[in-house]
Image: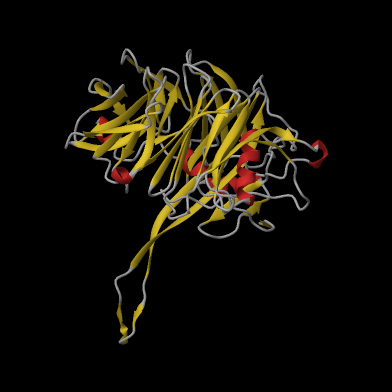
């Protein structure tokens, strides 16, 4: 799905971040390509930090202790991994890393083990089965690398576990489960996955264009959680134990409204399921306990109600236009009608930051006259038009909405705000450590790998929070004044 433009309001006066440079190290990357990559990880069984940085020719592996003092460094060529994408890692019992370089078609992965002591590397290759339809997602758990894939026309998923240079394949069978829409029509598991399954991240903001998808996947400790929101009456959930492969099916009724919902969706976070349902007259929100299914909080607003606890205005953006402010709940619901609803949640300490909105996309075509005559046309060129509406809010630990519109920014807010001001930084990765975030990035001007720490809040607390939208941070942009509507 095409990424939408991202929305901020930036303060007119200078902003001081809660940030500190922890470390910097010269790296002789010559900015030879836009294909550079940075991956930062924490050893799940120790306090060591690893950073992997590469351009299109060379790779640098940096190993730090918990105080971020450099313990070892290994430089290697990636000539055998050129035109591949680095998607993950694993750490062996000897603490030497294995990196997983995928081909552009995702049919083959190159495993490269790097011996930091001997300064050597060794490659292995793994070919996925020919009937693998696509890779759903990849993830790490306890220093082990996993790939979740879907086989063509099969009612199961395959979980590939890469550890110590070996691959174990596990099957997750969905044959016995029933999939039905609100009218009772049945579908196969394969049919349900005809639309992509998008992975939601735990420690960063998930933009509304991702959260509005009906098929989502979450990695929560030793569990994989799949949610399906194709049914306007209920959310269907599969809670999968990664070790035992046990699959538990759950259903959560969508919020009740006076009139039938036109669109509904959900979001899992911190053992709670957040649900939203809407029509042109009403917006309903539920927060449910994931284990019991019991409702913890319910909220409902009509088109004539105001929503005083919003921490942003109602915002609307279509395609490449600037965002517009919607003045009333009625206008928000009118614009939400016909879109795929979405809700996104990020918990930071006791506060859960929530974005509610929706996304719609459709194809259009450009027709260009032929230079030989007005009656002839070139082949039409397709393009995607999009529309997104949303507002931000926040819940406290008691699941009550916070009415303070000047909630201090989180560490991830400050991190992405920093990136929005430093657009020359294009190779970076964020690593969550305790209650702060570390941004690892290559500075092409200084030719250094820099590790910068970000914490919650401002150094100058009187300045307020200039960031209006906390939910869409995958590629920050800044805009001028927002036009009211």
Q: Residue at x 61, y 51 (%)?
A: 422
* Res 244 → quadrant: top left
Location of residue 474 in the rendering, given as x and y in whole percent from the top left corner: 52, 44
| Count of number-bearing discs | 0
Q: Residue at x 22, y 28 (%)?
A: 155
Q: Residue furthest front?
A: 118
In the depicted view, which residue is nearer to us: 423 or 222?
423
Vertical arrangement, residue 276 with respect to residue 2, above or below = above
In the depicted view, which residue is nearer to us: 152 or 177?
152
In this rendering, position of residue 10 left or right of residue 195: right
In the depicted view, which residue is nearer to us: 326 or 52?
52
Q: Residue at x 60, y 58 (%)?
A: 322
Location of residue 384 in the rendering, given as x and y in whole percent from the top left corner: 41, 57
* Res 143 → quadrant: top left
In this rendering, position of residue 401 left or right of residue 78: right
Give the image's coloring scheme. Answer: secondary structure
Vertical arrangement, residue 157 with respect to residue 222, above or below = below
Q: Residue furthest left?
A: 130
Location of residue 237 in the rendering, given as x and y in whole percent from the top left corner: 39, 23
Q: Is residue 285 visible?
A: no
* Res 402 → quadrant: top right
Q: Residue furthest bottom?
A: 373
* Quadrant housing the C terminus: bottom right
Location of residue 418 in the rendering, given as x and y in whole percent from the top left corner: 64, 45
Vertical arrangement, residue 374 with respect to residue 184, above or below = below
Q: Is residue 356 visible?
A: yes
Vertical arrangement, residue 278 with respect to residue 325, above or below = above
Q: Residue at x 64, y 56 (%)?
A: 479
In the depicted view, which residue is nearer to us: 276 or 88?
88
């Amino acid at each position: 799905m095409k990424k939408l433009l991202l929305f901020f309001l930036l303060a007119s006066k200078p902003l001081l971040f809660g940030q500190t440079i922890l470390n910097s190290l010269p790296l002789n990357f010559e900015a030879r390509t836009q294909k550079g990559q940075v991956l930062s990880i924490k050893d799940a069984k120790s306090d060591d930090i690893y950073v992997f940085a590469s351009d299109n020719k060379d790779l640098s592996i940096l190993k730090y202790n918990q105080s971020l003092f450099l313990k070892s460094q290994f430089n290697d060529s990636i000539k055998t991994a050129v035109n591949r994408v680095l998607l993950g890692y694993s750490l062996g019992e000897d603490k030497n890393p294995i990196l997983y370089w995928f081909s552009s078609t995702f049919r083959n992965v190159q495993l490269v083990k790097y011996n930091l002591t001997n300064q050597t590397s060794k490659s292995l290759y793994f070919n996925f089965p020919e009937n693998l339809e696509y890779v759903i997602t990849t993830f790490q758990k306890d220093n082990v690398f996993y790939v979740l894939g879907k086989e063509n026309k099969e009612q199961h998923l395959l979980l590939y576990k890469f550890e110590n240079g070996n691959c174990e394949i596990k099957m997750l069978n969905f044959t016995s489960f029933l999939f039905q829409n609100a009218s009772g029509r049945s579908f196969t598991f394969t049919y349900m996955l005809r639309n992509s399954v998008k992975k939601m991240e735990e420690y960063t903001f998930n933009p509304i264009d991702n959260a509005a998808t009906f098929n989502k996947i979450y990695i929560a400790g030793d569990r994989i959680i799949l949610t399906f929101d194709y049914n306007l009456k209920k959310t269907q959930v599969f809670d999968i134990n990664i070790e035992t492969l046990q699959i538990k099916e759950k259903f959560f009724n969508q919020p009740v409204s006076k009139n039938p919902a036109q669109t509904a969706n959900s979001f899992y976070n911190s053992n709670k399921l957040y649900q939203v349902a809407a029509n042109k007259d009403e917006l309903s929100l539920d927060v449910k306990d994931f284990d019991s299914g019991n409702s913890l909080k319910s909220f409902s607003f009509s088109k004539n109600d105001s929503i005083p606890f919003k921490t942003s205005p109602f915002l609307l953006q279509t395609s490449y236009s600037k965002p517009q402010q919607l003045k009333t709940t009625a206008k928000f619901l009118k614009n939400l009608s016909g879109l795929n609803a979405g809700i996104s949640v990020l918990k930071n300490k006791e506060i859960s930051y929530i974005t509610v909105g929706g996304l719609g996309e459709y194809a259009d075509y450009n027709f260009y006259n032929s230079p030989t005559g007005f009656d002839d046309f070139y082949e039409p060129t397709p393009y995607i038009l999009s529309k997104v509406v949303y507002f931000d809010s926040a819940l406290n630990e008691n699941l009550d909405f916070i009415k303070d519109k000047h909630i201090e920014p989180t560490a991830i807010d400050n991190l992405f705000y920093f990136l929005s001001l430093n657009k020359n930084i294009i190779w970076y990765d964020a690593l969550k450590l305790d209650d702060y975030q570390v941004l690892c990035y290559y500075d092409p001007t200084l030719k250094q790998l820099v590790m910068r720490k970000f914490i919650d809040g401002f150094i100058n607390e009187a300045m307020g929070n200039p960031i209006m939208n906390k939910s869409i941070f995958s590629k920050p942009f800044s805009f001028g004044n927002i036009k009211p509507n």
